[in-house]
Image (tube, rainbow, N blue to C red):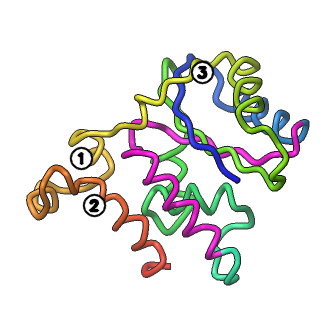
Amino acid sequence: MIKIIGAKGNIQDVDGFLKKVLQFVKENDILIQVFDAELIYGKNHLFSAFEHAKRAMDRKTNTTNSIEMETLLYSSGERQLKLAIPKMGVKKGNVSIALIFISKSQNKNLDKVVSEFLEELSLKKDNSVLEGDEDTLNKFGISENELKTVTKAKYGNLILEKVAMVDVIK
């Protein structure tokens, strides 16, 4: 079971923030991956990245040792973590972030876990940060020529294509 949300917050110490995330993960027996929402183009972007990562783990074609990092890799459209982390990882300052919560248990109340997480890390839920636009696509590395190949209604497909291409470039 997964849940994808957007949030805003002020992160002054990225390493400290990530340590708090890891502590929360351990205490709640859940997996969490955090992304820079500036490069997210809708929930489908992250859902597709997660599904590709899960399939790679199942088939043993994964590049990383965790579903969280494999999802980060796919979401970035990159083949290597050294490129994916600077591109999609959490940044310092007043930021918009996207999060995937992954529960191994069907019995876990993810809504409750998400609320506790947001409160503990002083974040405010805001799913509008997941909405992406033409600027998001440009920041992601999609060229004007690529944008011209589809209608605006299909812009999300350009991101999904980049996610799927990770399988090819691996």
Report the side of 32 relative to 151 (left or right).
right
C-alpha gap between disc 1 and disc 2: 11 Å
User: Is residue 49 located in the magenta-colored stretch of the structure?
Assistant: yes
- Residue 49 placement (x, y as % from top left): 52, 60
Q: Main secondary structure of the magenta part?
A: helix
Cβ–Cβ under 8 Å for marks 1 and 3:
no
Image label count = 3
C-alpha gap between disc 2 and disc 3: 30 Å
Q: Residue furthest front?
A: 107
Q: Earlier in the sequence, mark 1 or mark 2?
A: 1
Residue drawn at the location 54% of the way across and 50% of the way down? 85
Label 2 sits on what residue type?
A: Leu
C-alpha gap between disc 1 and disc 3: 24 Å
Q: Which residues are magenta?
A: 28-56
Q: Which mark is residue 138?
A: 1
Depth check, mark 2 against mark 3: the one in front is: 2
Classify 10 Å Cα crowding around label 2: few (below 14), some (14-19), many (20 and above). some
- Residue 13 placement (x, y as % from top left): 65, 23
Report the side of 37 relative to 123 (left or right).
left
Q: Is residue 162 above or below residue 106?
A: below
Q: Earlier in the sequence, mark 1 or mark 3?
A: 3
Q: Which mark is residue 11?
A: 3
User: Is residue 105 located in the magenta-colored stretch of the structure?
Assistant: no
Give the residue at mark 2.
158
Label 1 sits on what residue type?
A: Asn
Q: Is residue 45 above or below residue 58?
A: above
Label 3 sits on what residue type?
A: Ile
Residue drawn at the location 67% of the way across and 16% of the way down? 122
Q: Give whichever of 163, 115 is nearer the camera.
A: 115
Classify 10 Å Cα crowding around label 3: few (below 14), some (14-19), many (20 and above). many
